[in-house]
Image (spheres, rainbow, N blue to C red):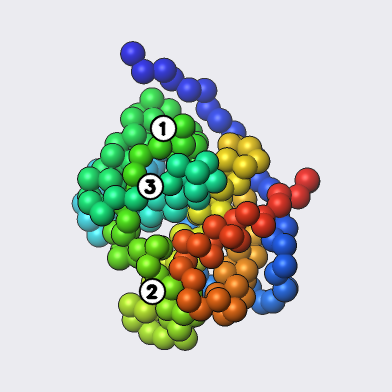
Amino acid sequence: MKQKHRKLAPFLATLLVMGVVTAGPAKAISDRRIEDARYACITFMNGENEENGNKGSDRAELARFWLIGFLTGAYDADSVLEFSDDKSVAEHAIIARVKDYCEENIDNSIHAAAVGSVSQPEPLPATTAIGLDPRAYSCASYSDGLNSRGNAKSLSEAAEFWAFAFVQGTVSVRHHPRLVISVANKRKIVRALKQSCARNPTRTLLDQTSEIAMRVRPLPE
């Protein structure tokens, strides 16, 4: 019999990213409910059961992308990060575990489900469903894509969404599992990514985001 978890209430935090110069607001792919731990398991499960192209289905797909980014950051912080080139099998294993959690805890958030997956690491898909491989996607590609159109622009925006999820995963391991970096602070992570990638164009998204995540310091409320 599966153990039922009590509802976990996340707590939000502002943050300090060391070495980042203040600038204007960031524009990126975003979903405040997913990124602020307000996207419930039951909503995710319902979206997974909808037909492709429906709003709920599209949102569940974005939640999958967030989950992969979050777990990449969490596993990296725990030094257990591995990738699999068989992306469909790897993603299926991760999502199956999240669904198992959500079936037993429908009122908890997708963030709680992600935290619950950290203790039993599995290889993550090397390439996401939208074609982003953080091990190969370079800072130069990210920076160039910001001023481009079409797929290049979309990948840059996806990289920002992924990077924020990565930082949230890292913080959950290094500081507290229920600590959620509010989406209101996303612009600080994006700003750090833009500035550091401009200085280090040959670095990969994975390496650069990992370095940024290690500089994040949640501030007491």
- The label on residue 154 is 2
Q: Residue at x 34, y 34 (%)?
A: 97
Foreground pick, 53 / 218:
218
Q: Residue at x 37, y 67 (%)?
A: 136
Mark 1 lies on residue: 120
The reply to whether dot 3 and dot 2 touch (C-beta < 8 Å) is no
Mark 3 lies on residue: 82
Q: Earlier in the sequence, mark 2 or mark 1?
A: 1
CA separation, marks 3 and 1? 12 Å
The answer to whether 174 is drawn above or below residue 100 in the figure is below
Residue 119 location in percent, x, y?
46, 32
Q: Earlier in the sequence, mark 3 or mark 1?
A: 3
The answer to whether 213 is drawn above or below residue 121 in the figure is below
The answer to whether 119 is drawn above or below residue 151 in the figure is above
Mark 1, residues whose alpha carbon is within 10 Å: few (<14), some, or many (≥20)? few
CA separation, marks 3 and 2? 26 Å
Mark 2, residues whose alpha carbon is within 10 Å: few (<14), some, or many (≥20)? some
Q: Residue at x 62, y 69 (%)?
A: 192
Is residue 215 at all visible to an observer of this figure?
yes
Residue 158 location in percent, x, y?
42, 66
Residue 218 location in percent, x, y?
71, 49
Q: Amino acid at mark 2?
A: Ser
